[in-house]
Amino acid sequence: MNFRRRIVSALAALSLLAPALAGCSSLSDDAADLDGAGLVASYEEFLAESTTELKEIEGIGEVSQAPISGVMWESPVMIDVEVSEEFAEAQTVAVVETLRRVSDGYPSYGIPVAFTIRVAGESAGRFRVAGLGLYPDFVISNFNYWRALEQAFGAELTMVLLTDAYDEASYSRIIGPGNGAVSRETIAHMLIKYDALATVSSEQSSGGIGVAAAQGRKYEMWALPGLNASNHLPPRDVIELVAALGRSFPLQENAWLGLDYDYPAALAAAGALVQWIDNEAALHGREVAVNSAEYRDDEWPAIVAAAAGTAQVTGFDFGYASPEREFRFHTSPCEGTIEQTADDELLFAALREGGLASLEDLAPGRCVPNYPQSR
């Protein structure tokens, strides 16, 4: 799959896929047990040889494999490797170099491989790589970034590297919670640890811990309950907005990418989701979306409160959607068409009655930009 298409797919999947990334079920180390994945004989040989070679790395822990599927993984199998706490960095380098060396023996098939690094003693955190299209030093620098973030956060996190098999300088990384994290607790804890996380994020942006800034052909996404953010850690007020929304509505759990399995869009969960892109010119790059399976009159005060809270953060559009009712406002001016309904006017009137100070920067309805016409 084209790398840029994979990035676009990742951004789209953030709001469509259910959370399943944090754990593959362990199967036997014998690749022959993976017949259900429809593997060709050469790939089974590759997996068997990889497992044997990985187990010979000094001090390495358990090595296992599991079939995977999903729009982001080009590999049909995840190789899971446990490294020790004391020698995690050196063993991770050895894992990357071993898999690249073994794959070189199968050049005619262009064998892709996905692998997971688990640090012994951690139950929820994962470092995952979607392919071998990166130099080992790129992988290990991101591995160190993941561990620095975990230390700053004071809890386990997951990081996924999506690589480009044709360009070893292109990649993206996605940061999310560890498996089993509770939505509101995750966001509340992030606010407590925000300064420490911001320090680590700032250091990596300047190359302080050997990780190039997320720019150019590098991308970074934060996928937390109720939040999709790129290209770096969003400002504190954005996290505070997520926390405030979480007090009135469930946060969308599917903000985290379900990269292990295919999920139909119909499984997308209801709840609140904040979209934040580090580019004020991005179309619909900063908005709050509250989705509900049905509208209830007793939910109206919470809708107004969510809209008022959104209006306190500069530049955010707001939308509540259910099969019965929709309430929306956008930040002015709009260079395009404004889709406006009586419900949008009703919400705006409620905000006006509440004495919202920033009302002059808002307008009822949704702004649909004038997209350039292609020839």
Image: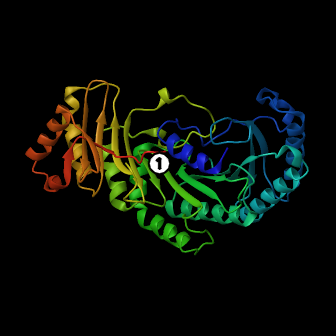
Can the viewer see residue 124 in this picture?
no
Viewer-closest of 263 and 181: 263
Q: Which residue in the structure is indicated by mark 1?
A: 224
Task: Find residue 374 and report its horizontal and vertical position in percent.
Answer: 47, 45
Task: Find residue 313 and report its horizontal and vertical position in percent.
Answer: 27, 56
Residue at figure coordinates x 52%, y 36% from the top left: 17
Q: How was this image coloured?
A: rainbow
Q: How crowded is the residue under tag 1: few (<14 C-alpha within 10 Å), some, or many (20+)?
A: many
Task: Find residue 45 and report its horizontal and vertical position in percent.
Answer: 90, 40
What amino acid type is highlighted by mark number 1? Leu
Q: What count of labels does the image hold?
A: 1
Position of residue 238 in the picture relative to residue 131 (left or right): left
Depicted 168 relative to depicted 309: above or below? below
Task: Find residue 159 and report its horizontal and vertical position in percent.
Answer: 60, 53
Residue at figure coordinates x 54%, y 46% from the top left: 8
Position of residue 343 in the picture relative to residue 175 (left or right): left
Quarter of the figure with the N terminus? top right
Q: Give the SS element for disc 1.
A: strand
Viewer-closest of 221 and 60: 221
Viewer-closest of 158 and 135: 135
Residue at figure coordinates x 73%, y 53% from the top left: 165
Q: Residue furthest front?
A: 375
Position of residue 24 in the picture relative to residue 309 (left or right): right
Can the viewer see residue 297 in this picture?
yes
